[in-house]
Amino acid sequence: MKLLVTGGAGFIGSAFIRLVLGDPTVQILNVDKLTYAGNLDNLRSVENNPQYAFVRADVADRAAMRDAFEHHRPETVVHFAAESHVDRSILNPQPVFDTNLAGTFTLLETARAFGVARFVHVSTDEVYGSIETPLEADEAYPLKPSSPYSASKAGSDLLALSYFTTYRFPVVVTRASNNYGPYQFPEKLLPLMISNALQDRPLPVYGDGQQIRDWLYVDDHCRAILAVLGGGRDGQIYNIGGSRSLANLDVIGAILSATGKPESLIQHVGDRPGHDRRYALSSRKIMSELQWAPLVDFEDGLRRTIRWYQDNEPWLEHLRTGEYQRYYAENYGNR
Ligand code: NAD
Ligand code: TYD
């Protein structure tokens, strides 16, 4: 199978590439712009694999996408590339619009022109907005995104699905809950709290810290995407949840006890504007149709993740220097 992956130098995309390269019949082209969040160090273990190739390009660049498709002739596409962080999307929504909306449009157009047989659009549970207890969002739940990030993902989901309705283009949309695991950029809750705790730095908790997220280990997410790639139905949406709902302060408490650090590191800070209180997903559809289930429980996943950050201090150090800093400063100012 010839597969084109976008955003493969990021957190989930790189885990997906490492997983898929276990299949000797797959040829992957990874198309990534290498923003602050894209890091080729995430792919060191596969960079010399003859089944893998990389091109640095922006998914919103029509000519570059045409070149990539012409060169690789993919049968399938898995689209991870995105500006993926809510706080950054609040600070500066422009790159969010450019990549998540305009970029997805350009990629869909190119894939359609080249007659791709399967296009997986990787999305998020955040498109459903905050969910009242005890409800869970299934795939038919109304969309009510709160942030520029989640609104851009909801828009790109709808655009992708319209390509099925209008052109019969074989799109499938996945909506996963909060991922965690190795190689996650330390701007999201888990890696930020783990790396700060390991360095005895304060842990900034937004508001009262009682917001609820459903945690999914990244490898479980990647197995789900692979299942959808192989067996999902065209024009369908598949929720992918971790079946583990926790309040942020409980996650932070677990990190403090696993790292042996004191609760005094916790620092309550101002709340995020438009902060969603609770995410909760029903994953019944993917479980029954594709026999997928999460395999890594939160305690085990957290242990593995903390160990990885402890063992990979140079990876974290690299992020504090280098090109991402320039991009970060240009796009988000010096925070
Ligand atoms: P990430 O921020 O770690 O990586 C994003 C990657 O996309 C980076 O490698 C970056 O360089 C690349 N990229 C950004 N703009 C690009 C552009 N214009 N052209 C080409 N490449 C570009 O993100 P992630 O956490 O790995 O998320 C991947 C996907 O999964 C996103 O679509 C995100 O919305 C979705 N998702 C993430 C989570 C989560 O918890 N992280 C949960 C559900 C869904
Ligand atoms: P995040 O990892 O940014 O994911 P998302 O907002 O997309 O769910 O945040 C997860 C939760 O953690 C969210 O409720 C916001 C909260 N949070 C903090 O309290 N402090 C922080 O420094 C960060 C990054 C997040």
Image: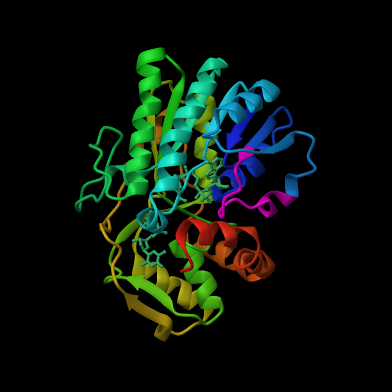
Q: Classify residue 29 by image quadrant.
A: top right
Q: Classify residue 262 by image quadrant.
A: bottom left
Residue 99, percent from left and from top: 47, 40
Residue 140, percent from left and from top: 26, 32
Residue 208, percent from left and from top: 26, 71
The residue depicted at 43 percent of the width and 20 percent of the height is 234
The residue depicted at 75 percent of the width and 45 percent of the height is 47
Q: Nearer the viewer, residue 77 or 16?
A: 77
Q: Classify residue 215 by image quadrant.
A: bottom left
Q: Nearer the viewer, residue 88 or 170?
A: 88
Q: Quadrant of ligand 2?
A: bottom left
Residue 252 lies in the magenta-colored region: no
Counting every numbered tag in the picture gives 0
Q: Nearer the viewer, residue 66 or 134?
A: 66
For residue 19, side relative to residue 330 (left or right):
right
Q: Do we see residue 291 in this rendering?
A: no
User: Which region is colored magenta?
Assistant: 31-44
